[in-house]
Image: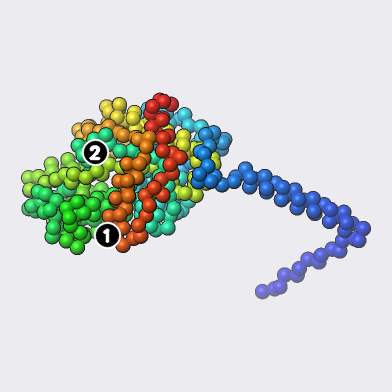
Amino acid sequence: MFARERPRRMPVPALMRPALAVLLLAALTGCAGGGEQRNTAAAALAADAPLPVTVPKGTKLIVGDPATKVALQLSGEIDTFSFAIEWANISGGPQTSEAFRADALDVGAVAEIPPIHATWTGLPVKIVASKFRKDPLQHPTYELGIAPGVTVKTLADLRGKKIAYSPGQAQGALVLKVLHQAGLTKDDVTLVELPSTGDVYPNALASRQVDVAPIGGVNIRRYTAKFGKDGATTIRHGLRDDPSHLYVRTKTLQDPAKAAAIREYVAAWARAARWVYEHPEEWIAGYYVKDQGLSAADGRYLAELAGEPDIPADWSDAIARHQETIDILAKETGNPPLKAEDLYDLRYQTVGADAIKDGA
């Protein structure tokens, strides 16, 4: 290789040096002043500062909430936001956390476990919206699927059984809570780690890979319809399993523009939930049938299963129930205890309820 000859530095005439120094100082001063202005404009929003109401022009959120996207399309509200939304086809805790870590997502829609798991894995997050079911025991999200030939009529019968388990997800937490309710621990059963996606759990039950598995949604109906003749059954666990949250990275809320945009999105999310309940036929046709490819019968089953949404203006009870879940998970997994209230940004506590009350 040949060494590249450095260009010679031309000497500055003595008479020009003072003028050059003045120009350079002025340029540096101007840069510092401009930077100070920019830093002031982009100052981080303190965790206890009031939420900004106005969303600055040019703000964008990346949102992983596919069901709400369809609801907003069907209700006609999707084009009314004061900011741009990029919709990400992301759902579930693992996908959402991965997108958060990649700085590819601002808002995620999940159940109660992902915020806990994210915190335990070093990803600070905050819950900004909470939704439940008016009659959660009558409309559970999951039932316990029982494999053909296995006898489980009560929770006490779970002792000694092989149970499907998905760490870090709602189904996995439900298993631990059910065991706790039955006076059992994970040492009293055999936990078989399996992903809870798609038909994995129903197929694992049918093949006797596991004896018990929490199955949800349309799989409850399909499982007994398909394998009931072989002796497949389900039982209800009798616990609340209805939390539904929007959560974001803590650092996202430090951006005043995004914090304001999230406030606007939470309000629209709440109205969308109410719209879905009040327009079941449009929701069944537009979401379950057209978007998800289900039959109208499956759609009606799921709409009835969901029941009426409850979006409280006070999160005290929700936080208390979340704390119970955290305590059970911490004990069974060996993770450190967390304070449930620390997972919530209480500045958003009334946003959803107010949006429904005001209708705007």
On the image, which quarter does residue 318 sit in?
top left
| Residue under pointer 2 | 136
Across and down, in percent, residue 37 comes to 67, 45
Q: Residue at x 30, y 33 (%)?
A: 309
Q: Secondary structure at mark 1?
A: helix
Location of the C terminus by quadrant is: top left
Which is more toward the observer, 24 or 203?
A: 24
Across and down, in percent, residue 46 comes to 53, 46
On the image, which quarter does residue 242 sit in?
top left
Q: Residue at x 13, y 43 (%)?
A: 224
User: Total marks drawn?
Assistant: 2
Location of the N terminus by quadrant is: bottom right
Q: Is residue 65 in view?
A: no
Q: Amino acid at mark 2?
A: Pro
| Mark 1: few/some/many CA within 10 Å (<14, 14-19, 20+) | some
Colour scheme used in the picture? rainbow
Q: Residue at x 41, y 25 (%)?
A: 358
Q: Amino acid at mark 1?
A: Glu
As drawn, is 159 to the left or to the right of 7?
left
Which is more toward the observer, 254 or 85?
A: 254
| Mark 2: few/some/many CA within 10 Å (<14, 14-19, 20+) | many
Q: Secondary structure at mark 2?
A: loop
Across and down, in percent, residue 156 comes to 12, 53
As drawn, is 5 to the left or to the right of 72?
right
| Residue under pointer 1 | 332
Across and down, in percent, residue 286 comes to 31, 31
Q: Residue at x 50, y 41 (%)?
A: 259
Which is more toward the observer, 230 or 38?
A: 38
As drawn, is 301 to the left or to the right of 96?
left
Which one is earlier in the sequence, the residue at label 2 or at label 1? 2
Q: CA distance from mark 2 to mark 1?
A: 25 Å
